[in-house]
Image (spheres, rainbow, N blue to C red):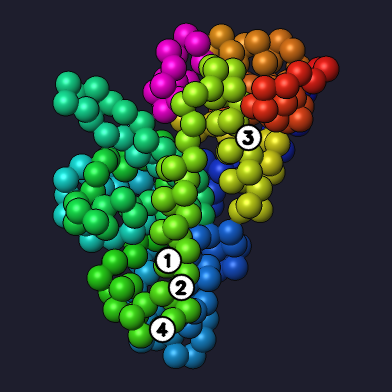
Amino acid sequence: MAQRALNTAPELCAVDFQADHASACDGCALVGMCTAIGFGEPGFQNVEKLIAKAGPYRAGDTIFRLDEPFENLYAIKSGMVKAVHLDAEGHEQVRGFFLPGELVGFEAISSGKYRCDGVVLDDTWVCRLPFTRLSAVAAQQDQVQLHLFKLLSRAISDQAERNWDLSADQRLAAFLLDLSQRYAARGFSPIRFRLCMSRGDIANYLRLAAETVSRVLARLRSQGILDVHGRDAELLKPEVLQAMLAGTSLRS
């Protein structure tokens, strides 16, 4: 892939947050909720403090930690956050990556404590949403309650759909296609995006060895299916990735 094409990839890991409201909020998981509680309407003054912008967080910062009391949901406005849990032996387990427009923290609702660390992977801005106050608004406004239920249902579904009965090639294909679909749903390019996470984080998340991830990426690149330069990635033949995931062959 030509360097010129790479330079057209959206800088999803370092978006300028000083944009107008419309562009800053396009694709965000909270758009429907903000609209429902009156964002942009004359009466919004009563609830405008419900959602507080926070940042910038830098790579390595945490927006919440394991076992801290659950207070806020966080909508990622720019950058990326990974959810990391330490097992009994102190080893990191990457549970997920959260992109611009996605909401993190739902898993803490039942226990009242965060069940992982929310670790920032690149310069990141978030919207902080106090859950107790959100619940009070939701109890009074059906639209907010319905939207909250939909977000919760989606978060549960995303966890349930992970399938470990796949080969290494299929797991990586599924990972790349999932990123593609999530970016596309938020108005970004589905074929050119940045991999803000490290190869080690990808391997951890997919429960593979880092060497395996590097080997599969190298093979996909040599076959002209994927191009990766540093953190810039382009899906050259997403249809081949789809075929790999389905367990079928497709001429590349």
Q: Residue at x 61, y 53 (%)?
A: 186
Q: Residue at x 35, y 46 (%)?
A: 57
Q: Residue at x 24, y 22 (%)?
A: 91
- How far is mark 3 from mark 1, CA to CA? 26 Å
Mark 2 lies on residue: 146
Q: Mark number for residue 61?
A: none
Category of crowding for the residue at label 2, using alpha-carbon neighbours closer than 10 angstroms: few (below 14), some (14–19), many (at least 20): few
- How far is mark 4 from mark 3, CA to CA? 36 Å
Pointer 4 with pointer 3, Cβ within 8 A: no
Q: In terms of secondary structure, where does tag 3 sit?
A: helix
Q: Is residue 223 left or right of residue 24?
A: right
The quadrant of the picture occupied by the N terminus is: top right
Category of crowding for the residue at label 4, using alpha-carbon neighbours closer than 10 angstroms: few (below 14), some (14–19), many (at least 20): few
The quadrant of the picture occupied by the C terminus is: top right
Residue 113 pos. (x, y %) = 19, 51
Q: Is tag 2's residue or tag 3's residue first in the polypeptide sequence?
A: 2
Mark 4 lies on residue: 141
Residue 179 pos. (x, y %) = 58, 38
* 13 relative to 214, above or below: below
Which-is-in-front pick, marks 1 and 4? 1
Q: Is residue 208 magenta?
A: yes
Mark 1 lies on residue: 149
Amino acid type indicated by mark 1: Phe
Mark 3 lies on residue: 177
Q: Quadrant of residue 19?
A: bottom right
